[in-house]
């Protein structure tokens, strides 16, 4: 009999971008300049370690990858395609885009789709998917996702909070620990697509997801931006992160590329692409341009009510644009229609 889970998180781990996850020691002083890294095989032995208060701690810490990595890999073995959704700047509609991408994939009844919300401090996916009041259930198989439809499930920290207004005030390691539990303990089952919605920037959540998923494999990342240079500036940093982390960038999506009048369907450019927008950036960086999705005020309304924009407004130009983006994502990830 499933039961409601309590909000408990295992002792988390610190994440190292350039290596498999390892146990991070409890340091008594800040890491010095040129530190090889507490998880490094040279920890406590390098030239920079001489005189460091942490030297004996680092030298005595057991080295080796996180023993839970095989468990995570086994748990995710039934997921065919894993796609990260990233943005450098907050407020560009990344989570909204994630929900619409999920609905678009799930429109094919043969597809099983999941969303993992790793925006720990600002979880908005449950509200947009209409499952804000749900809670996590646990069984012998593990944590059960909250199912929006027969073929669309969601996992988010929001389901673990006593109230939707409760703030999550956590430091990086605790966030990492919850993300690890999402990957290790959630029984996703057989999925065609797992979309991982991330917070803005290049922070702990991104490092955790990349490190934990590295062994099981990630198809790549979709980067969302708006046309303005102030957004593109941060997207360049996101692309640099992906390259350093060896994450394939499937392409760039320009969100809010214009305004669609719900009555006459005419489009106006509200946010001017002063430096050429996402299309020019894609050309400059050699990254595929997946498409431009216009603003439609009904998108916000659908998200507020937790309903599918695709089902309710199939005639919107934004729907047609998103369907084009879905096809391009599948092409760049080498996915044939149907999830193969």
Image: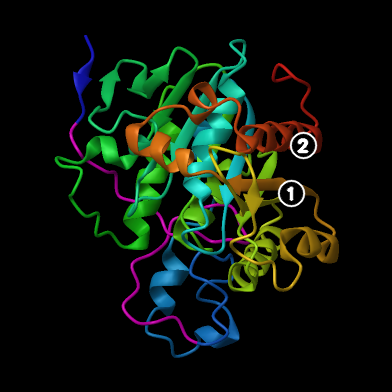
Q: Secondary structure at mark 2?
A: helix
Asked whether 217 or 21 is in front, the reply is: 217
Q: Give the image location of residue 159, x and y in percent.
A: 27, 35
**Left or right for 202, reference 13:** right
Which quadrant would the C terminus be assigned to in this image? top right
- Please state the extent of the stretch shown in magenta in the rendering: 6-32
Identify the secondary structure beneath mark 1: strand
Residue that numbered label 2 is attached to: 328
Q: Residue at x 80, y 64 (%)?
A: 280
Badge count: 2
Can see residue 67? Answer: no
164 w.r.t. 18: above or below:
above
Q: Is residue 74 above or below residue 177?
A: above
In this view, 98 is above or below 276: above
Q: Main secondary structure of the magenta part?
A: loop
- Residue at left offset 57%, top offset 75%: 36
From where the camera sits, is residue 315 visible?
yes
Dot placed on the residue nearer the N-terminal end, 1 or 2: 1
Image coords of residue 26 (percent x, y): 33, 67
C-beta proximity under 8 Å, tags 1 and 2: yes
In the image, residue 9 lies in the stretch drawn in magenta = yes
Asked if 283 appears above or below 247 in the picture, the reply is below
Quadrant position of the N terminus in the picture: top left
* Residue sitting nearer the eye, 75 or 340: 340
Specify the quadrant of the image occupied by residue 323: top right
Residue nearest the viewer, comparing 163 with 306: 306
**Residue 251 has which mark?**
1
Q: What's the CA distance linking mark 1 and mark 2? A: 9 Å
Residue ID at (56%, 44%) = 261
In the image: residue 232, left or right of residue 89: right
């Amino acid at each position: 009999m499933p039961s409601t889970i309590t909000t408990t998180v295992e002792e988390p781990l610190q994440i190292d971008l350039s290596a498999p996850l390892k146990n991070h020691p409890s340091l008594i002083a800040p890491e010095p300049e040129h530190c090889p890294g507490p998880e490094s095989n040279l920890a406590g032995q390098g030239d920079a370690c001489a005189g460091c208060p942490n030297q004996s701690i680092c030298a005595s810490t057991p080295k080796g990858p996180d023993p839970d990595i095989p468990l995570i890999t086994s748990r995710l073995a039934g997921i065919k395609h894993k796609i990260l959704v990233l943005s450098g700047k907050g407020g560009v509609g990344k989570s909204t885009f994630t929900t619409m991408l999920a609905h678009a994939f799930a429109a094919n009844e043969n597809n099983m789709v999941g969303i993992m919300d790793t925006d720990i401090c600002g979880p908005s996916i449950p509200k947009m998917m209409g499952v804000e009041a749900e809670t996590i259930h646990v069984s012998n198989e593990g944590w059960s996702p909250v199912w929006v439809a027969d073929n669309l499930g969601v996992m988010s920290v929001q389901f673990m909070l006593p109230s939707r207004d409760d703030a999550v005030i956590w430091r990086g390691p605790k966030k990492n620990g919850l993300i690890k539990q999402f990957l290790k303990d959630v029984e996703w089952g057989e999925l065609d697509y797992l979309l991982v919605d991330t917070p803005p920037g290049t922070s702990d959540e991104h490092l955790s997801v990349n490190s934990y998923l590295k062994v099981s494999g990630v198809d790549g990342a979709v980067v969302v931006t708006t046309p303005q240079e102030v957004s593109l500036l941060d997207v360049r940093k996101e692309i640099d992160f992906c390259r350093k982390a060896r994450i394939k960038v499937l392409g760039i999506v320009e969100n809010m590329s214009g305004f669609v009048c719900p009555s006459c369907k005419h489009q106006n450019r509200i946010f001017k692409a002063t430096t050429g927008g996402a299309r020019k950036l894609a050309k400059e960086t050699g990254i595929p341009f997946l498409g431009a999705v216009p603003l439609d005020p009904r998108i916000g309304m659908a998200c507020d009510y937790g309903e599918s924009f695709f089902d309710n407004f199939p005639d919107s130009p934004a729907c047609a644009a998103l369907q084009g983006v879905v096809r391009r994502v599948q092409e760049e990830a080498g996915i044939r229609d149907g999830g193969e």
